[in-house]
Amino acid sequence: MSEKTKLVVLGAGIGGLSAGYFLTRNGKYEVTILEKSQDIGGVCGSFTHDGFVLDYGAHKLYSVIPGILDEIRGVMDGRLLKVLKKNRIFLRGHLLDYPLKLGNLAKALGLGTFLKLGVGYAVTFVMGLIDRKPAASYEEYILKRFGRGTYELVFEPLADKVWGDPSTLHPDMARTRLPASGGVDVILRLLGIKKESKETSAEYFYYPKKGFGDFPGTLREKIEEKGGKVFTNALPQRVIISDDKIVGIEVLMDGQPSVLSCDYVVSSIPLSALGELVFPGDDKFNSAVQKLEFRNVILVYIFVNRPVILEDQWIFFPEREYIFSRIFEQKQMNPDLGPAERTSICCDFTCTNDSWQWKAGDDEIAAKCVEGLKKSGFVKDSEVSGHLVVRFPNFYPRYDLKYQEKIKEVTLKFRELDNLLLTGRIGMYNYNNADHCFDMGKFITEKITEGKQISNIMEELEQRVANYRIVD
Ligand SMILES: Cc1cc2nc3c(=O)[nH]c(=O)nc-3n(C[C@H](O)[C@H](O)[C@H](O)COP(=O)(O)OP(=O)(O)OC[C@H]3O[C@@H](n4cnc5c(N)ncnc54)[C@H](O)[C@@H]3O)c2cc1C
């Protein structure tokens, strides 16, 4: 009987589990997944609290990668709800359709602002015919498509809140979220003459009935059915390298040391954590990896004594006077995920390590969120019954103007190892969604099975990842 190829996956977020799922399904691999925390799923997980099933912020299942959504629906057979998407943007006290429509803006913002925006579009359109140079920053990318009026009203404050100064952001940051259609296309969509396509806005999305965490949970089930192993509380300590290959991993499992041998390693853990395992004490690598910029995510759940608050699943808040950039009501995904008489609103925002938000205590930032929810008219003080704050450090890769050179230096260093693959959001430093992580797992499995060289697989994967789009 031929021995299976041994493969260790680091991290059991959706990135690691997707790789594990496709590898075990293939049948040629003996897969072991090591997850340092006690739960699987990472940021795609769900948890229970005070009678609620809660996700880590608004998570929808959707994809424009050919075949991927069908593949996910196959895996999640019978476990998904099809949800009509409703989300808007809260601006100057009004709820407006998102993506924005000019007619809608006119009603809400008054004639003066509307005319200013109209002139902005006209100028942008004419300039676009003359100036064909590619945008050098996020700011330029948006200005070239939407004009200064809309940029200053919506995009600049929202981008600044989520990413920090948009003039220091690479245009890829905008391209990932806003497809690179030309000026005419944007204007027709803004005027409502052209419908949004499935590449620019999802009309429907899918959602696991038991909470988003049922997606990683189902992948784990499928992996284990095929003989794969998923260990939680499993913290890798060191890798054993021989002839430029990782041949073993020393790991503490529930505090007990153990050694796993391996033919391949697929890593979805932060690049800095992987670096500590693979290149301990390498100052040059450490200084390169520390140059990659991130934003921390804070999720503030406000519990409210009312059956339901919003009509939308989530609402964007670009204005700076609100601490959060989005609010999300879990019960809008599935009303069964909370008690009948109460609801929860999750306020999400990002910040840096040295920001006051990151340093502030939970009560202080929860109070700021309640203040914003009251001001926007969504809750009353007397209805608020409690809060919960969850923090994820370094979860939003921030594409600064030099990010491509920076990530290249780090990933090329990992290519010194002939059997190490990277995947996932933080594992590959790319701003992505769960469907992209799923696609990466599929791609990696196909390419290893074809016998391709690891460096070639990684090169192709990097090109693939550069084309991923996040669809609102
Ligand atoms: C507010 C918000 C909204 C989002 N909305 C959507 C959405 O609508 N749709 C969508 O598809 N996606 C959405 N996303 C993105 C989605 O959450 C990510 O794409 C996905 O979670 C990335 O998965 P990952 O496995 O790469 O990373 P992670 O989820 O971070 O998983 C990494 C795993 O590795 C583990 N780990 C870390 N270090 C080690 C170590 N040293 N050893 C072992 N294990 C380790 C971690 O504990 C974790 O479990 C959203 C994200 C946020 C924050």
Image: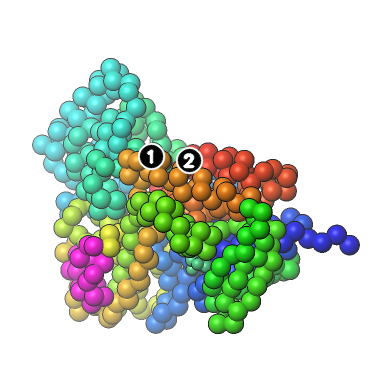
Please say if 277 is above or below 320: below
Quarter holding residue 327: bottom left
Please say if 39 is above or below 69: below
Residue underneath mark 1: 172
Looking at the picture, tell me which residue is in the foreground, 37 or 90.
37
Badge 1 element:
helix
Q: Residue at x 72, y 62 (%)?
A: 6
Q: Is residue 245 visible?
A: yes
Q: Residue at x 69, y 66 (%)?
A: 261
**Mark 1 and mark 2: Cα distance apart in space:** 8 Å
Q: Is mark 2 within 8 Å of ligand 1?
A: no
Q: Is residue 47 magenta?
A: no
* Residue 162 screen position, x and y as percent: 29, 53
Q: Is residue 366 magenta?
A: yes
| Amino acid type shown at disc 2 | Ala
- Image marks 1 and 2: residues in contact by CB distance under 8 Å: yes
Q: Residue at x 35, y 41 (%)?
A: 402
Q: Residues within 10 Å of mark 1 (few under 14, many from 20)?
A: many
Badge 2 element:
helix
Which residue, as the protein is rendered here, is positioned at the far top? 130
Looking at the picture, tell me which residue is in the foreground, 92 or 5.
5
Residue underneath mark 2: 466
| Amino acid type shown at disc 1 | Asp
Image check: 53 left or right of 102? Answer: right
Quarter holding residue 25: bottom right
How does the figure colour the protein chain or chains?
rainbow
Q: Residues within 10 Å of mark 2 (few under 14, many from 20)?
A: some
The region drawn magenta spans 354-373
Q: Earlier in the sequence, mark 1 or mark 2?
A: 1
Please say if 362 is above or below 117: below
Q: Residue at x 38, y 39 (%)?
A: 172
* Residue 310 screen position, x and y as percent: 32, 63
